[in-house]
Amino acid sequence: MIGVSKVSVKSDGFHTWTVDQVEKYREHHKLGTKPRLAIDILLFLGCADPMQSS
């Protein structure tokens, strides 16, 4: 695009959750809640990056 420059961002990427962090999240968000459904779908489908489009 004319007049728009690319923003450069330096990053080490995203932090990968530990098993302990996932267990704590699942304990906090009980079955039947939308956050629990979201994490379970991502985990059980093996989605590495939920924002990545194929």
Image (cartoon, rainbow, N blue to C red):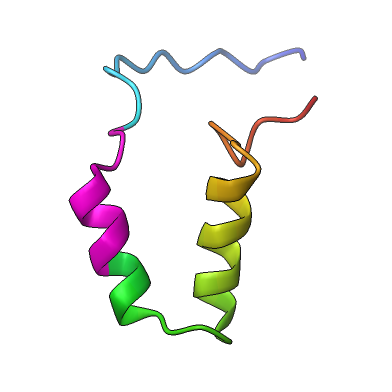
Q: Taking 42 as reference, is 14 above or below it? A: above
Residue sitting nearer the eye, 18 or 53: 18
Horizontal arrangement in the rendering, residue 18 relative to residue 41 (left or right) = left
Q: Taking 23 as reference, is 34 above or below it? A: below
Residue farthest toward the left in the current orientation of the protein = 20
Q: Main secondary structure of the magenta part?
A: helix
Horizontal arrangement in the rendering, residue 7 relative to residue 51 (left or right) = left
Q: Is residue 49 magenta?
A: no
Q: How many marks?
A: 0
The part of the chain drawn in magenta is 15-24
- Residue pictured at 65% horizontal, 43% vertical: 45
Q: x, y (%) of residue 54?
A: 80, 24
Q: Taking 26 as reference, is 6 above or below it? A: above
- Residue pictured at 55% horizontal, 60% vertical: 40
Q: Quadrant of residue 53?
A: top right
- Residue pictured at 34% horizontal, 30% vertical: 14
Q: Quadrant of residue 10?
A: top left
Horizontal arrangement in the rendering, residue 50 relative to residue 15 (left or right) = right
Q: x, y (%) of residue 31?
A: 51, 83
Q: Quadrant of residue 30?
A: bottom left
- Residue pictured at 77% horizontal, 14% vertical: 1
Q: x, y (%) of residue 6?
A: 54, 13
Q: Is residue 17 magenta?
A: yes
Horizontal arrangement in the rendering, residue 37 relative to residue 15 (left or right) = right
Residue sitting nearer the eye, 5 or 8: 8
